[in-house]
Amino acid sequence: MSGPERPHDGLARALDLASGWVEERVVPGVAVAVARDGVIIAERYAGKRSAGGGGPVDATTLYSVAAVTKPVTATLALRLVERGDLVLDEPVRRILPAFSDAAKREITPRHLLCHTSGLPQDDPALETLRQSEVDLAAITASALALDPVSPPGERVRYSNAAYWVLGAALAAAGGATFAGLVQSEVLARFGLEESCFAPPAAAGERIARRYGAPKHLNTSYARALASPSGGLFATARDLVTFASLFLTGGSRPDATRVLSAASVTAMTTDQTGGLPGGIDGFRTWPVCPWGLGWEVKGEKRHHWSGDFTSAATLSHIGQSGALLWADPATGLACAILANRDLGSGWSFHPARWARLSNAICAVAVAVASAGTAATCRC
């Protein structure tokens, strides 16, 4: 008769679900990292960086994480608040005079951060601009000229355009380029050594190619654009380390504080006050809590983080095939990165992200409690 299952065996079986996506040719490659209380307890790497014979996915593989960039951009915003360079409820027009049209006069950084600005989800001109390989300034200028489609504070209307505006506001408030500020105030400060905007040429072989996306998103131009809405490249390890800092009050495992407790609270608690909304054309809810940068689970059903994560769970998804979540109730954080865009529905039909998250939650706390020193590279 077999004895009770060891915790690591259960976690290995949970992560087999991700490996199965590769075996079933759902995605070319996948990287998963799981942490508890800021310590990585499990990792899984499977498949290849490119379906056309690229090298294997491993811990150093850089993924385009698309909109998972937004909590990083939001963290920069709160760092500038801590420095006294930004006020969340001051109109953006006071930082960016070009944002002064009557319909936009009362939009604030808080509105931009929690998607209640009323700005459209995307700039209709964005794809044309990108295909023309215009610079960041031209794309930002186009976003600044957009009119809201609803008044600020009326609805949670997920907006990539809002984060283009926000990036310009942060650069103006911080007195440096957006990418430079993120590097110094977030990536370096948080110890995210592999993550970057505009990855250098030497990192090219480590980048997972995006599938199901417009071809130009795999070009050197697109990779260098440093979009505040979706331009980050990161490893699974770095992302789960980043998310874990919001479960430990803004302190690293060595007790070094990198973000104030006030900033953590502002980013991780609902800022929308019961408004309806979500991501139009993708998923919306009658009540859609959202923090500053982080989406907050609340009572949402059919959630990408599954059934076992608590209402306090923070998360964000990325069109490139990325999911990052962190649950204050258990101390668990999880990064799931794949190189197939979400337009095909692969992560939701069936609910692959939720199934994997459920399986991880069911056993990961026991793994962490087992006290093993080594990470389970299962």
Image: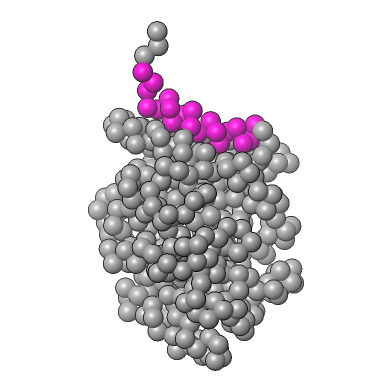
Q: Is residue 229 above or below residue 152?
A: above
Q: Which residue sits furthest front?
A: 286
Residue 8: say if magenta: yes
Return the x and y of residue 269 as percentages of the image width and height.
36, 63
Q: Is residue 41 above or below residue 153?
A: above
Q: Is residue 95 visible?
A: no
Residue 37 appears in which quarter of the rendering? top left
* The N terminus lies in quadrant: top left
Q: Which residue sits furthest top?
A: 1
Residue 222: say if magenta: no
Q: Residue at x 74, y 68 (%)?
A: 131
Q: Residue at x 50, y 33 (%)?
A: 15
Return the x and y of residue 62 as percentages of the image width and height.
56, 50
Q: Is residue 126 visible?
A: yes
**How many numbered tags mark residues here?**
0
Return the x and y of residue 182 as percentages of the image width and height.
45, 67
Q: Is residue 125 above or below residue 63?
A: below
Q: Quick check: 21 left or right of 245?
A: right
Q: Which residues are magenta?
A: 4-23
Query: Of 250 and 188, which appears nearest the observer?
Result: 250
Q: Quick check: 256 left or right of 342?
A: left
Query: Of 189 and 323, which appears nearest the observer?
Result: 323
Q: Residue at x 43, y 54 (%)?
A: 299
Return the x and y of residue 361 as percentages of the image width and height.
41, 38
Q: Residue at x 49, y 76 (%)?
A: 154
Residue 143 appears in which quarter of the rendering? bottom right
Q: Quick check: 156 left or right of 26?
A: left
Type of secondary structure dominating the magenta stretch: helix
Q: How is the image coloured?
A: one colour
